[in-house]
Image: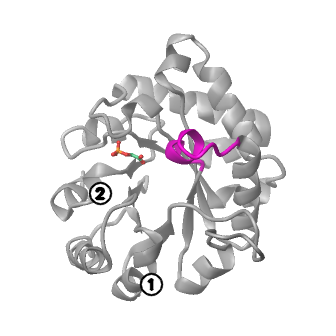
């Protein structure tokens, strides 16, 4: 049976006590959940949350990472520091990093390769803006983000890569892509990965949908053939919405 990958991106929310409280609730309420689970608290709460979820079925994720192992990089967090804390998965190329902080495909690619080199899993986010969708360049954008994000990534590393399709216009807006729309873009992602890495790898690739996933729409999205999980923002900030998403079946 397919195992879905349900991930929570807490973004710039939660103090340490708030993060510990939410992580404790999730640990308890999701103990019997069979899906692959991850939560990505803000950097400041990673260490405390790591202690809470140690030994549980929830993986610790980080929302970003610096492009170098160490050095004079004021304000950056290194892959070695994240590993040290117990982080297992890194979200890279999130649209807020791309569009608010100007991260390029080349920079994201450097981070992807660095994380994979250190045996971390990567969630590589891709997605078009509303303008790009309306201009009809959605496929060009997604193809570029996938191809350039994965430059230099060997096929042997693809099992550690999850793709998250997050249409920018659906993030935090309450607008969700229709399940059919999501499925067709996911199918397109799979075709691009098949061109790059062959059909076996493409078939096994986990593709999450992200953008206003909620308890009310999760079933319709997850039951689409090409949707293998969810990257959840707003609804991951409360156990009362994240738990039913993770336990959608
Ligand atoms: P949202 O965010 O669920 O609040 O739309 C998703 C994301 O940015 O990963």
Q: Where is residue 233 in the image (x, y as percent from the top left)?
A: 35, 51
- When the figure is inspected, residue 231 is found, relative to residue 22, above or below; the finding is above
Residue at left offset 44%, top offset 76%: 44
Q: How is the image coloured?
A: one colour
Q: Does the residue labelled 2 lie within 8 Å of ligand 1?
A: yes
Stretch of the chain drawn in magenta? 93-104
Q: Position of residue 184 (x, y in %)?
A: 49, 24
Name the element at disc 1. Answer: helix
- Does 164 sit left or right of 121 as displayed? left
Distance Cα–Cα, label 1 vs label 2: 19 Å
Residues at marks 1 and 2 touching, judged by CB atoms closer than 8 Å? no
**Which mark is drawn over residue 13?**
none
On the question of residue 198 being in view, the answer is: no
On the question of residue 202 being in view, the answer is: yes
Residue at left offset 37%, top offset 32%: 170
Provide the residue designation for mark 2: 236
97 in the magenta segment? yes
Provide the residue designation for mark 1: 47
- Does 199 sit left or right of 167 as displayed? right
- Does 45 sit left or right of 68 as displayed? left
207 in the magenta segment? no
Residue 193 is drawn in which quadrant?
top right
């Amino acid at each position: 049976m397919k195992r879905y990958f349900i991930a929570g991106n807490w973004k710039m929310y939660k103090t340490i006590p708030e993060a510990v409280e939410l992580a404790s609730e999730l640990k308890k309420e999701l103990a019997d959940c069979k899906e692959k689970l991850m939560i990505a608290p803000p950097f400041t709460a990673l260490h405390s949350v790591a202690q809470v979820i140690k030994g549980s079925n929830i993986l610790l994720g980080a929302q970003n990472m610096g492009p170098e192992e160490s050095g004079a990089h004021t304000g950056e967090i290194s892959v070695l520091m994240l590993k040290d804390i117990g982080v297992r998965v890194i979200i890279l190329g999130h649209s807020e990093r791309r569009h608010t902080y100007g991260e390029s495909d080349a920079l994201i690619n450097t981070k992807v390769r660095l994380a994979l080199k250190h045996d971390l899993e990567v969630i590589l986010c891709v997605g078009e803006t509303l303008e790009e969708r309306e201009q009809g360049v959605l496929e060009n954008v997604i193809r570029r983000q996938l191809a350039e994000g994965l430059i230099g990534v060997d096929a042997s590393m693809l099992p550690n890569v999850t793709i998250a399709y997050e249409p920018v216009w659906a993030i935090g807006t309450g607008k969700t892509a229709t399940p059919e729309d999501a499925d067709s873009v996911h199918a397109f992602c799979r075709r691009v990965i098949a061109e790059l890495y062959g059909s076996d790898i493409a078939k096994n690739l986990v593709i999450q949908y992200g953008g206003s996933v909620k308890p009310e729409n999760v079933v319709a999205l997850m039951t689409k053939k090409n949707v293998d999980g969810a990257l959840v923002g707003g609804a991951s900030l409360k156990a009362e919405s994240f738990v039913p998403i993770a336990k959608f079946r």
